[in-house]
Structures are given as C-alpha cells and as structure tokens.
Image (cartoon, rainbow, N blue to C red):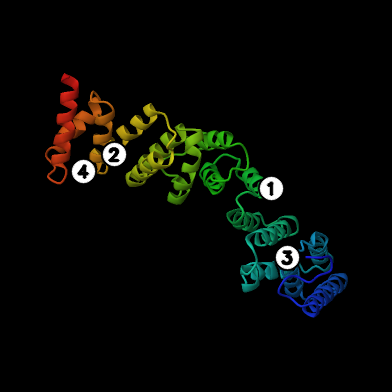
Amino acid sequence: MSEGEPPKGKSSSVTIAAEKARTLRVERLVALLDKRLDLPIAAIDALIAEAAEGEPQLPLWEKLHAAAARDGVEANVADAYLKAVSGARMRRLAADAQADVLVHAADFFQGIRGDLETTEQLLRRALELRPDRVDVFTRLERRLERPGEERRLVELHAVVAATPPREAKVLATQTLNRLVLLGAKQAVADDACRKLLALVPVNPKLLDALEAHCRATKRAALAAELVERALLEDDAAPAPIVTQRRHRLLDLYFGELNTPSRAIDHVELLLERDPNDAVAFKGGERLLGKSDVASRAASAVQKARRARSG
C-alpha cells in the first residue's frame, strides 16, 4: 500500500471522516480536562475510545488524574472508572488495551485515592488479561511479599506460571519456598494448583510440595489429578522421577482415595519397566481381588514373576 493510500476496504472519504472524528474527540477531551472536570465518565470513555484506536494517550490519562485532584472530584472519577472498566466499551477492547486501561485505573486508585484494595483488584484483572506484563506482576508481588500473604502470593505466581515474568527456575523456587510455609488451613485454590504445573518441569520438587499441600488440605483427589497430569505433560522427566510419581499415585489410590482399580495402569507400567519393583508388585497382588481389573493385574504379576525367575 502506497503512502497516503487509505486502509484496504475503506474509502478515502471514510478514512478522512474517521480522522476528523478522532481529532474532535481529543480536542473536546483536552478542553474538558483544562476546565472543571464535571463529566469524568465522558473523559474516561473518550480515553477508552482512543485506546481502541491504538492510541495510548499517556499524557491525557495523567492529565485526567491531575484534574481530579485539582477540582476535588476524586470520588466522582473513582466511580466513573469503576463503571467504565465494567462497561460494554471496555469489553470490546483488545486484551492489551484493556490491561492498559486497568493499569491507569489502578494508578488513580493508588496514587490519588490511596485505595490499595481496589488497586490490587484492578492490577489482578490486568495481569489475568496479560500475564506477561512484568510491571503489573512486580507491583502485585511487592504488595504480597510480607508474612501472612504466602497463599495469595502463590496464587499470584500461578497466574503467570505459563509465561513467567522472570526466569522460570527462579519463579518455581520462589513458589516452592512460599508453598511449604502454608499450613493446612491456607488452601491454595484448585485452579491455581493446576496452573502451577507449568513450572514443574524446571523444578520437580514443586510437584512434591503441591501434592503434599493438597493432601494436607484434604484434597487427595486434586493431588492425584496433579500427579497424573504431570506424568502426561512433563514428558522429559527422568525415569526415577516418573517411577516416584507413579508410586505416589499407588499410595493415593490404595490410601486416601480408596479407588484401587485406578492404580492398574501404573502397576502395569511400573512392572513392565522393572519387574523387581516391590511397590508395584504388591499393588498388583492387591488388585487380584478387584474383579474389574483382576485379569490385568494377574497378567502383570505373572509377567513380573517370569522376568524375575528368568
């Protein structure tokens, strides 16, 4: 497309009209901010419209906040922000632009209102939209790096686990260290535990901690789910670690979960790899009394015995 040519699919007149509309919108916004800020929702809507056009307009966002303080209408601007970020116009923005608007709102609530709770909520929404926003992650992490906030900090790390804002090994170790500090009364959300599996390949001990945490908080089923998923997703794990994980599943299925038949796949795989695996062999023998898997268990145990004697 040559210079000055309108975007494909748009006529020159449409493009010119759109540019004129944008120019008028910005001029009206500047006039509104220069005078008394009587219509904060109109100002925020105009800035959101600019964001939709890919125009950050950082100086105007800052000017909005300054005008709110100048005119003593901080409460009105706060209400306008909360309505705007939950409105239909906001939902039509791309994720990047939504995150930018939420950060501007957070800046206002922190810097002008001193409302740290709302600030955190807004930043959390921004991070969920854009987990790779290092600036947002850092602000939230800094707020939660204090005694008593270990659970919330671990859940924050879960949001960014798939796209770590720092070296994955470092984040995994930091998460592990916070996780082991949690007591049985501080249960990390189920979904957060699942998201943290993304860090297990760089630090296998994190899975150990997650399993122990889930069992301590009476969520044995979730513990088993996490270990099963790690077996599928962490396909580069060394053989000894894979064996250890399958042993844990046997312990869970024969123990807290009391669903021994679910152990058959792992018994078969363990004995195929090592006929002398005492844990798996014992599990196979216990499954001989379960009619739904007895034939599979008998075959696995028989093969292991032949391999041992051979």
The disc placed on residue 261 is 4
* Three-letter amino acid code at the position of disc 3: Ala
Q: CA distance from mark 4 to mark 1?
A: 48 Å
Pick whichever of labels 3 and 4 is earlier in the sequence: 3
The residue depicted at 12 percent of the width and 45 percent of the height is 291
Disc 1 residue type (three-letter): Asp
What's the amino acid at mark 4?
Answer: Ser
Nearer-N-terminus badge (2/1)? 1
Q: Give the labeled residue for mark 2.
A: 252
| Mark 2 or mark 4: whose residue is earlier in sequence | 2
Q: Nearer the viewer, residue 234 or 199?
A: 234
* Disc 3: which residue: 51
* Residue at far top of view: 310
Q: Quadrant of residue 34?
A: bottom right
Lower sequence index among marks 2 and 3: 3
Where residue 271 appears, as percent x and y from the top left, is 24, 30
Gap between marks 2 and 4, in whole Å? 12 Å
Q: 36 or 309, which is in the foreground?
A: 309
The location of residue 171, given as percent across then percent down, is 57, 37
Between the residue at mark 3 and the residue at mark 1, the CA separation in whole angstroms equals: 19 Å
